[in-house]
Image (cartoon, rainbow, N blue to C red):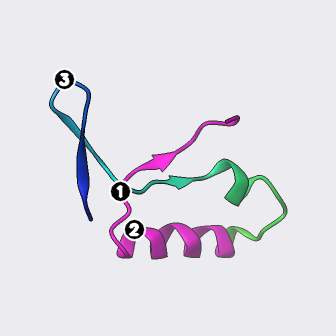
Amino acid sequence: MEYRRTGRSGLKLPALSLGLWHNFGDDRTLHSQRAILRRAFDLGVTHFDLANNY
């Protein structure tokens, strides 16, 4: 996973994140939701955006 520096703070964030609102705001099964999260993590995603509005 590529990481990018954020501003002048020195904080680095991954180039990709998974936004959960659109992925989990419907009637998907808990099993399906867990599978999406686990697969993303296995692929290197470490930032999960939990905002309820974009």
| Amino acid, disc 3 | Arg
Q: Looking at the image, do the residues carrying marks 3 and 1 touch, with CB atoms under 8 Å apart? A: no
Circle 1 is placed at which residue position? Answer: 46
Considering every residue shown, the one lying at the far right of the view is: 27
In front: 14, or 36?
Answer: 14
User: Residue at (47%, 50%) from the top-left corner?
Assistant: 48
Considering every residue shown, the one lying at the far top of the view is: 8
Question: Picture quarter containing residue 13?
Answer: top left
> Does residue 23 appear left or right of residue 27 in this picture?
left
At which x and y percent is residue 45?
38, 62
Above or below, 40 relative to 54: below
Above or below, 6 relative to 24: above
| Residue 3 inside the magenta-drawn segment | no
> Does residue 24 appear left or right of residue 46 in this picture?
right
Whole-angstrom CA distance, mark 3 to mark 1, is 21 Å
| Amino acid, disc 1 | Thr
Give the SS element for disc 1.
Answer: loop
Circle 3 is placed at which residue position? Answer: 8
User: Residue at (72%, 53%) from the top-left corner?
Assistant: 22
Crowding near pointer 1: few (<14 within 10 Å), some, many (20+)?
some
Circle 2 is placed at which residue position? Answer: 41
Count of numbered tags = 3
Q: Looking at the image, do the residues carrying marks 2 and 1 touch, with CB atoms under 8 Å apart? A: yes
User: Residue at (77%, 52%) from the top-left corner?
Assistant: 25
At which x and y percent is residue 20?
61, 52
| Amino acid, disc 2 | Phe
> Does residue 52 appear left or right of residue 41 in this picture?
right
At which x and y percent is residue 42?
37, 75
Q: Earlier in the sequence, mark 2 or mark 1?
A: 2
Q: Earlier in the sequence, mark 3 or mark 1?
A: 3
User: Residue at (52%, 66%) from the top-left corner?
Assistant: 37
Q: Which residues are magenta?
A: 31-54
